[in-house]
Image: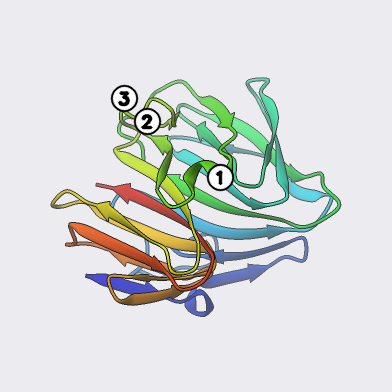
Amino acid sequence: MIELRTRNELGRANHGWLDTRHHFSFANYHDPARVHWGNLRVWNDDTIAPQTGFPPHSHREMEIITYVRQGAITHRDSLGNQGRTEAGDVQVMSAGTGISHSEFNREDTETQIFQIWIIPNATGLPPTWGSKPFPKASREGHFEVLASGYPEDTEALPIQADARVVAATLSDGQAVAYTLEAGRKAYLVPARGRVRVNDVLAETGDGLAISDETRLTIAAEADSEIVLVETA
């Protein structure tokens, strides 16, 4: 089963400095049918105005993955970590027992990010943060694992969850396959472009909630960049 959730039907809030769309219930947007997808709890599509951002705030017991689509995001946290993550790259924060952080767009142009939250395997773990460059050229025509809770994904950023975050860039007419074990779920969003997934068409910013499928064929109908979360 593949359920299409078009960008226009997602939850939305525009705060001036932040224009955001919510694939799942978040803040003032609540849809009882869209609270989570397996262990995937949040997928926000954020556009952040120049020289603005999220002031310091706290999280607990959540794996938070930031995929930068355009521009850059600058991170600071209560552990003393700081870093700037650019378009195509990823940062991961395991909130664990508690962490405070800020995320600012210090650039002179808009920054666009996917903010993805995944429920962790265990509670009471120490908080951590990390980031890593993932050049888009390294995933042309195939999936690259960006963040993972599995030790075999040695090149990925580690998360404390039964989940994997992958991405691929496809040229118009190119196709790629992805295999899911029985009982696994996936959620796929084109960061740009247009793709057909097992005959279901998704445009930029749409969401595809996938279950009871063991093989996905993703065919690009325009130059595309896709992000997929596989989870229990």
Dot 1: element:
helix
Residue 136 sits above or below residue 128 on the image: below
Kindly check if marks 1 and 2 are in contact, taking CB atoms under 8 A apart as contact.
no
Q: Write the residue at 82% across / 47% down.
A: 107
Dot 2: element:
loop
Q: Write the residue at 15% across / 52% down.
A: 183
Task: Name the image colouring.
Answer: rainbow
Q: Which residue is mark 3?
A: 151
Q: Which residue is mark 1?
A: 137
Residue 200 sits above or below residue 129 on the image: below
Q: CA distance from mark 1 to mark 2?
A: 27 Å
**Left or right relative to 205: residue 103:** right
Q: CA distance from mark 3 to mark 2?
A: 11 Å
Q: Position of residue 222 (x, y in %)?
A: 51, 71
Q: Position of residue 14 (x, y in %)?
A: 69, 69
Q: CA distance from mark 1 to mark 3?
A: 24 Å
Report the mark closest to the observer, 3 or 2. 3
Mark positioned earlier in the residue sequence (1 or 2): 1
Mark positioned earlier in the residue sequence (3 or 2): 3
Work out which residue is located at the far front of the displayed protein and give it: 173
Q: Which quadrant would the N terminus be assigned to in this image?
A: bottom left
Mark positioned earlier in the residue sequence (1 or 3): 1
Total tally of numbered discs in the picture: 3
Report the mark closest to the observer, 1 or 3. 1
Q: Write the residue at 39% across / 60% down.
A: 188
